[in-house]
Amino acid sequence: MNRLRHLPAGLAAGALVAAMALAVPAATAAQAASGRANVVTALDYNSTGWAYRQVPATTQVAGFAEPGFDDSAWQRGQAGFGTTNGTCSWNNQTNVKTPWAVNTDILVRHWLHLPRDAQAVRIQGTVDNDAQVYFNGHLVQSVKSGKCAAGTIDVVVPATYLDCCNLLAVRGHDYGAAAYLNLRVTYVKPAQAF
């Protein structure tokens, strides 16, 4: 199924270019030396190109996690999202690239490309406080992490949810004091037979 057909024309071209740029594998030296399946980062922490919108916690934005949703009026930013004050080690100017106000929700969306042979697609990240994580419109994880609980977002996406062009969408919720959200997506690329 072509996910780009759901995007406005200008965004479809931009999403395709971004997806192609993300398609370049980045295996680590240790993985390459092993000659086994490689873990490839499709979308890294602190990545750019996120569409985002901050809303009051009670505001519902119907369909925001669906590939066909029009986010062309949303702001664009870089992860991590959050505040630079607080007691968590990541609440600083080095880790926070885009402000996210406390006591609000943040809706974020990012397109990414995965090759046909991608396996074990895994979403990992940190949120202060809670998050609902969606992949191509499917809820894949609900996280209630509390304060400063690093790595609480961690889910392998069911293979039936995968496509060539994929949408990662998250609704983060903050309860006050400090906010933070940062994510990455990796996959396993099978070793080629010789």
Image: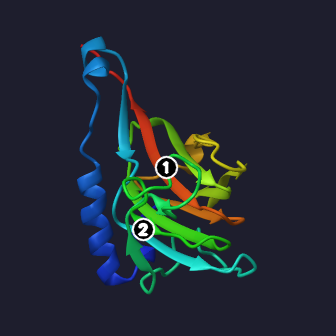
Q: Nearer the viewer, residue 121 or 43?
A: 43
Q: In the displayed structure, would residue 109 be above or below residue 138?
A: below
Q: Which mark is residue 98?
A: 2
Q: Secondary structure at mark 2?
A: strand
Tell me if I can see residue 192 in this picture.
no
> Image check: 128 left or right of 33?
right
| Residue type at tag 2 | Thr
Is residue 94 toward the left or the right of residue 139 in the image? left
Using the image, determine if residue 71 lies above or below residue 176. below
Q: Nearer the viewer, residue 3 or 151?
A: 151
Comparing labels 2 and 1, the label whose residue is closer to the camera: 1
Q: Which residue is mark 1?
A: 90
Q: Give how far across and how far down residue 84 sits, in percent.
A: 48, 62
Q: Earlier in the sequence, mark 2 or mark 1?
A: 1
Q: Amino acid at mark 1?
A: Trp
- Identify whether 52 is placed above or below 182: below
In this image, 84 relative to 116: left or right?
right
Q: Residue at x 71, y 80 (%)?
A: 60
